[in-house]
Amino acid sequence: MAAKIKKGDTVIVIAGKDKGRSGRVIEVRPGEQRVVVEGVNMVSRHVKPSMSDPQGGIKQREAALHVSNVAMRDPKTGKPTRVGFKIVESKGKVRIAKGSGVEIDV
């Protein structure tokens, strides 16, 4: 099965504490059905001092969101949309935005 959301896509959060916020997908975890979105679902982590980070302290970073809580951002309208697939002779199988029918490129 082809992935509907890929790294680099712009998504909108449709459920949870960050509902309405959007960002770029920086990591996809298909085995866990989760995605990490840039600047969304920020959590605090206590980091022990190390050679690479001698200061340590409390650091902010993105946590993963379940893929059902995000929706692809329609390239034409900017609203949340579902993703479908279409066979194009020159390109093969391509992703399309269900709302507007526009082809989605990464």
Image: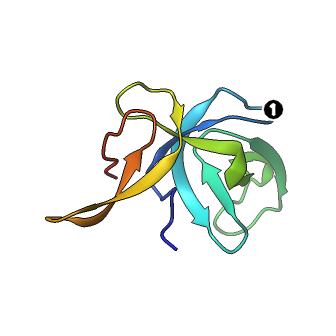
Residue 16 appears left or right of 30: right
Residue 25 appears left or right of 74: right
Q: Residues within 10 Å of mark 1 (few under 14, many from 20)?
A: few
Residue 17 appears left or right of 31: right
Instruction: Tell me what residue is drawn at x 57 percent, y 33 percent.
Output: 22
Q: Residue furthest left?
A: 90
Under circle 1, the secondary element is loop
Instruction: Tell me: residue 33, above or below residue 38.
Output: below
Instruction: Tell me what residue is drawn at x 72 percent, y 29 percent.
Output: 19
Q: Amino acid at mark 1?
A: Lys
Instruction: Tell me what residue is drawn at x 45 percent, y 48 percent.
Output: 9
Instruction: Tell me: residue 71, above or below residue 85.
Output: above
User: Which residue in the protein does label 1 denote?
Assistant: 17
Could you say where residue 61 lies in the image, as x and y percent from the top left? 70, 48
Could you say where residue 15 lies in the image, as x and y percent from the top left? 76, 36
Instruction: Tell me: residue 99, above or below residue 26.
Output: above
Could you say where residue 31 lies in the image, as x and y percent from the top left? 68, 75
Instruction: Tell me: residue 13, above or below residue 93.
Output: above
Residue 4 appears left or right of 32: left
Instruction: Tell me what residue is drawn at x 81 percent, y 32 percent.
Output: 17
The image shows a total of numbered marks equal to 1
Residue 42, quarter of the rendered image: top right
Image colouring: rainbow
Residue 89, quarter of the rendered image: bottom left
